[in-house]
Image: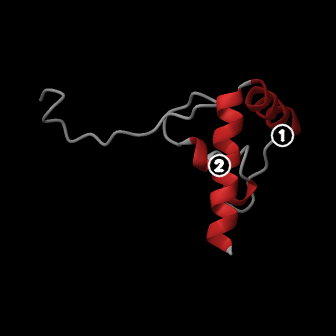
Amino acid sequence: MDKETSCKKLTPKCLVCGIQGHSLRDYWCLFKDKRPAGVIIGDARINRVLKKVEKNKNLTNQVAKIRLKEQEDKA
């Protein structure tokens, strides 16, 4: 099969960690409410992620928009 006829589903790649399979919107390190119950993420990892987002204005803006939209959806 070639690329056009392939049945494989395209999965998003996270803009922060670079791992394929989740989008920025679903990144557990940034959005605690997205974490499954019982999942614990180390403080060092969270701090690295926050610093990376803080240094990149585009990522900072995207995270802010996601948080704003989620607040609006809850209201």
Looking at the image, residue 46 lies above or below residue 55: below
The label on residue 14 is none
Q: In the image, residue 36 lies at what x, y percent?
A: 67, 59
Q: Which residue is drawn at 63% across and 41% down?
A: 62
Q: Do the residues labelled 2 and 1 touch (CB within 8 Å)?
A: no
Say what secondary structure mark 1 lies in.
Answer: loop
Q: Which amino acid does label 1 sit on?
A: Gly
Crowding near pointer 1: few (<14 within 10 Å), some, many (20+)? few
Q: Mark 1 points at which residue?
A: 42
Quick check: 1 left or right of 49?
Answer: left
Cα separation, mark 2 vs mark 1, equals 25 Å
Q: Which quarter of the figure has residue 47? A: top right
Quick check: 52 left or right of 1?
Answer: right
Which quadrant holds the N terminus?
A: top left
Q: Quick one: 39 or 2, which is closer to the camera?
A: 2
Q: In the image, residue 65 lies at what x, y percent?
A: 65, 49
Q: In the image, residue 10 lies at what x, y percent?
A: 34, 39
Q: Which quarter of the figure has residue 46? A: top right
Q: Residue at x 71, y 51 (%)?
A: 31
- Judge depth for marks 2 and 1 and give the one in front: 2
Q: Which residue is drawn at 57% across and 27% down?
A: 18
Which quadrant holds the C terminus?
A: bottom right
Say what secondary structure mark 2 lies in.
Answer: helix
Quick check: 9 left or right of 50?
Answer: left
Q: Residue at x 71, y 46 (%)?
A: 64
Q: In the image, residue 74 lies at what x, y percent?
A: 67, 72
Q: Who comes first in sequence, dot 2 or dot 1? A: 1
Q: Name the residue under label 2.
A: 65
Q: Which amino acid does label 2 sit on?
A: Lys
